[in-house]
Image (cartoon, helix red, strand yellow):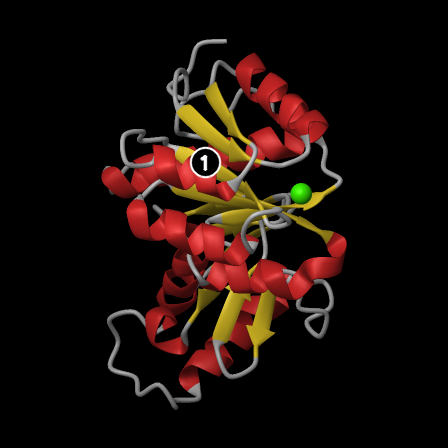
Amino acid sequence: MKDHDSGKLIAIVEDDPDVARIIEQVLRDFSLRTIWYRSAGDLLRRLRTLSPDLCIIDLGLPDMDGIEAMQRVRAQSSCGILILTGRAHVSDRVMGLELGADDYVLKPFEPRELVARVRSILRRRENTAAPGTRQVAEFSGWRFNLGNNTLSAPNGEEHALSTAEAELLKVFVQNPNRILQREKLMGTRDLAPTDRAIDVRISRLRRKLEPDPQSQALIKTVYGAGYLFLATVNWPEEGNSGGV
Ligand code: CA
């Protein structure tokens, strides 16, 4: 398969050689280059000369706390960061996203799911470099057209969004799995951070997106911090999505 991710370099920090082998194999199947480190220290030393496009960091490492490792990678490199974490460490996952990871994958994982997350981060990074190329976002069966503010439901039903709702959803799809402070979500409008308008707008968007608005499956309130859009977002017009 030919696509623009070809040859991108993915660094993997994982102390379990079996898991590392699975990750390397599936990424290579998608023409990505990989380099594996058994410890965070090994990667951090190499980062002085190596410029990976993305680092996959296991949060359970023998030599260093995974969150600390992630922060140190972030301090040295602007690469994408995907964290791997066990189900028991949900708070680590949230903290990881808060501290600069782009996404996370729970262990045990489906190799194809991992590749999809990696490619989504790579694509997002490219889109950030070239704004204006993103028109259609897909997430959880939904399709959001940023060009005309329409939202298609998984069942095909179309909703037209107000400009305010579309602006809000645009920030969410461009920053998935990341805690967004209220200020960030208010965009260019003159709203004070305490303004109820943002909450009203969120609840209107939730009524459109969530089968049960109380469940917060997609738009999660993080008390005292802001909101989190929990979804893998794909931008299908960006080349061939490859059927992943
Ligand atoms: Ca581990």
Q: Is mark 1 within 8 Å of ligand 1?
A: no
What's the amino acid at mark 1?
Asp
240 sits to left or right of 74: right
Residue at horizontal 62%, vertical 49%?
Answer: 153
Q: Residues within 10 Å of mark 1 (few under 14, many from 20)?
A: few
For the C terminus, give its image quadrant: top right
Outermost residue on the top side: it is 1
Q: Quadrant of residue 87?
A: bottom right
Residue 88 point in image, percent of width and height? 75, 59
Instruction: Reply above or below: 141 against 16.
Output: below
Mark yes or no: residue 121 visible.
no
Front-lying residue, 116 or 151: 116
Residue at horizontal 39%, vertical 22%?
Answer: 8
Q: Secondary structure at mark 1?
A: helix
Q: Quadrant of residue 167?
A: bottom left
Front-lying residue, 226 or 15: 15
Residue 214 point in image, percent of width and height? 71, 75
190 sits to left or right of 36: left
107 sits to left or right of 51: right
Residue receiving disc 1: 42
Mark yes or no: residue 13 visible.
yes
Front-lying residue, 163 or 103: 103
Image quarter for ligand 1: top right
Instruction: Reply above or below: 89 against 111.
Output: below
